[in-house]
Image (cartoon, grey):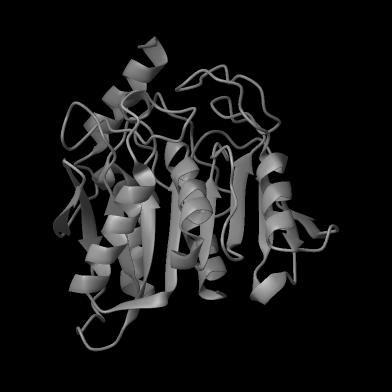
């Protein structure tokens, strides 16, 4: 284990209790012989009668469900906008922290043990649908870093279950991504990311040292899969470049937001520890992501 990975995991562990108020609901599902878990936070508007949308938030490598809740403040957005916030737990030696996802080339315990993540997400969605009033047409996924890889994996393997995904500082690692239907995709990535470099290559601060695919690889793949125009509508302002490919098949779209000088972080979110990159203030990723999801 690298020194950076130890520091990242320690930072995530120390950050878990901060800014967490009400207790979310913990759910368990079985995937083969393994018990997996996830957290659910229902908005104040939930009454069990009206079906509500849901946002799955995948934590980064070395994090956990509660750290993702703290980092993204997605539960606060869920209470304000009326959607269910869902925080899946990765895998690891410890049951509630320092967890990772198997995204083929990354990361840690989950990759080494070849955890079937698509089966877990499928089981989670089935359990969520069976126990809560879920609007099946408005299920979304997002995540950062290793969790962003999971958002991509979910859309590639389970396109019929997701209307849209948003990836923050993540990489498309799925070797053969062939979604069964169009999925709208939003990508947010900083040009100064040293974990998963914007232009690809091996990250100087990488959690799992491998040759990273460039951000453009993911954008081009999803643009092709969704049948989008080659040329994007582009806007530049406040250190951000927005490139939107639309209209695409079935009303889908692919958008890339490039954060000039942005590091490996959730823009506008909480910085979990000083050893981690300072989040950019050029945008609030949680607000932007929900606005994108709400269109689909």
Q: Residue furthest front?
A: 32
Q: Is residue 80 above or below residue 175?
A: below
Residue 110 position, x and y percent, is 33, 30
Q: Residue at 47% across / 37% down in the picture? A: 145
In this rendering, does residue 240 appear at all? no
Q: Is residue 43 above or below residue 12?
A: below
Count of labels in the image: 0
Q: Is residue 245 above or below residue 205?
A: below
Q: Residue furthest bottom?
A: 49
Tell me the quarter of the image containing the N terminus.
Answer: top left
User: Which corner quadrant of the image does residue 101 belong to?
Assistant: top left
Q: Nearer the viewer, residue 172 or 2?
A: 172
Residue 128 position, x and y percent, is 25, 66
Q: Residue at 38% across / 32% down in the picture? A: 61
In this rendering, does residue 14 appear at all? yes
Residue 79 position, x and y percent, is 31, 71
Q: As drawn, is 56 to the left or to the right of 128? A: right
Q: As drawn, is 201 to the left or to the right of 114? A: right
Q: Residue furthest right?
A: 231
Q: Is residue 55 above or below residue 149?
A: below
Tell me the quarter of the image containing the C terminus.
Answer: bottom right
Q: Nearer the viewer, residue 67 or 273?
A: 67
Residue 230 position, x and y percent, is 84, 57
Q: Nearer the viewer, residue 92 or 186?
A: 92
Q: As drawn, is 288 to the left or to the right of 234? A: left
User: Which corner quadrant of the image does residue 3 belong to?
Assistant: top left
């Amino acid at each position: 284990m690298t020194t950076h990975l130890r520091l990242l995991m320690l930072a995530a562990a120390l950050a878990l209790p901060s800014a967490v108020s009400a207790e979310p609901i913990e759910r368990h599902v079985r995937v083969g012989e393994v018990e997996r878990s996830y957290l659910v936070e229902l908005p104040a508007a939930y009454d069990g009668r009206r079906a509500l949308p849901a946002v799955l938030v995948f934590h980064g490598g070395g994090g956990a469900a509660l750290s993702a809740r703290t980092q993204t403040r997605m539960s606060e957005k869920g209470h304000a906008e009326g959607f269910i916030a869902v925080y899946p737990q990765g895998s690891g030696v410890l049951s509630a922290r320092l967890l990772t996802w198997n995204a083929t080339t990354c990361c840690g315990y989950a990759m080494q043990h070849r955890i079937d993540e698509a089966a877990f997400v499928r089981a989670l969605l089935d359990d969520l649908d069976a126990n809560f009033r879920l609007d099946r047409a408005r299920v979304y996924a997002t995540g950062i870093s290793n969790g962003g890889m999971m958002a991509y994996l979910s859309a590639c393997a389970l396109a019929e279950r997701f209307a849209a995904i948003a990836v923050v500082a993540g990489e498309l690692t799925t070797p053969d991504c062939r979604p069964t239907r169009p999925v709208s995709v939003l990508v947010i990535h900083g040009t100064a990311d040293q974990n998963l470099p914007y232009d690809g290559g091996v990250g100087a601060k990488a959690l799992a040292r491998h040759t990273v695919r460039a951000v453009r690889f993911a954008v081009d793949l999803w643009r092709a899969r969704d049948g989008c125009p080659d040329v994007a509508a582009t806007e530049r302002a406040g250190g951000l470049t927005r490139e939107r490919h639309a209209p695409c098949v079935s009303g889908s779209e692919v958008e890339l937001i490039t954060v000039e000088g942005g590091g490996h972080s959730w823009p506008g979110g909480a910085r979990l520890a000083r050893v981690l990159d300072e989040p950019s203030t050029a945008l609030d990723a949680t607000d932007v992501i929900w606005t994108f999801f709400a269109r689909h």
